Image (tube, rainbow, N blue to C red):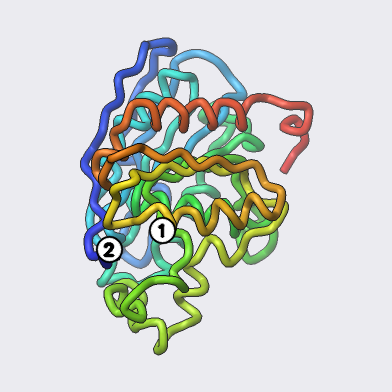
Amino acid sequence: MMIPSILLVAAVVAPEAASFEFETTTDIVYSKVGDRELLLDAYVPTSGKDRAAVLVVHGGAWKMGNRKQLKGYAKALAKKGFVCFAIDYRLAPQHLFPAQIDDCRSAVRWIREHADEYKIDPCRLGAIGYSAGGHLVSLLGTTGEAPSADNGNIDTRIQAVAAGGAPTDFRQFPDNGEWAEYLMGGDLSEVPEKFQQASPAAFVDATDAPTFFFNGTQDELVPVVWSMACHQALKTAGVRTRMHTVDGANHLQAAADPDALQQAYQFLQTELAPTADSENEL
């Protein structure tokens, strides 16, 4: 089993029949950490209201990449009527975990704070990511919290996740986690709490977001078993979840597989469709 020293995926654009027209607004500040402004790009359909929103989180081994990387995902979903927000987040090794997931949670709060501005239903918020981004959206899906003083009294729970090429249990990594020292600040023996905190599978319960996983069967960077850990835990907990494998695909090939992406988008559409429950305030 190869240690995933690089979890980088190029920008992908899946063929998609146009349905909704949308506008793109770039370089929006969603958070500020010290002197650093964290930016997002918004892909907003030009018609409709009370729309579902999707957070788009890029990959790159938690140490490279930016919000432009998965603009193909964002554009495809915007054409389906979703309001999409593709974010930057702080990168390792300059910023150790949990900086990356903290920034994703800040983005969730920002989206809900701006729900009226973007005509979003704050009760219908999903997330999609690939590779390191798949890990982060999976972690959002299993660690969201109800409003409290600690999260600014804004709900950080999301309602659906699509995670591609996603490592979901850091407690199972080979080499005692030495490859992840640049992210964690130590190996599994030195900072076991970090590896626990980073593992979506460690936090699964029956209230978690329904999740769609997709993974190439020949992915040596993130083998299917590493996504399967969270999928199986969610299934055991009674949470709706699907695992789609792309036969013969490696890490990069699965990221752009048209069938996998169409299934991921459809999963988000199904899970984020309006319901009577979505009319209740979070």
Residue 260 appears in view: yes
Where does label 1 land, which residue?
167
Q: In percent of the image, x 23 and y 37: which residue is there?
A: 11
Q: In percent of the image, x 54 and y 31: which residue is there?
A: 267
In the image, 32 versus 18, the foreground residue is 18
Q: Tag 1 or tag 2, which sits nearer the N-term?
A: 2
Q: Residues within 10 Å of mark 2 (few under 14, many from 20)?
A: some
Which quadrant, please, contains the C terminus? Answer: top right
Q: Amino acid at mark 2?
A: Pro
Where does label 2 land, which residue?
4
Name of the residue lying farthest toward the bottom? 190
Q: Amino acid at mark 1?
A: Pro
In the rendered view, does 120 fall on the left or right side of 182?
right
* Quarter where residue 33 is shown: bottom left
Asked which secondary structure carries label 2, the reply is loop
Residue 147 appears in view: no
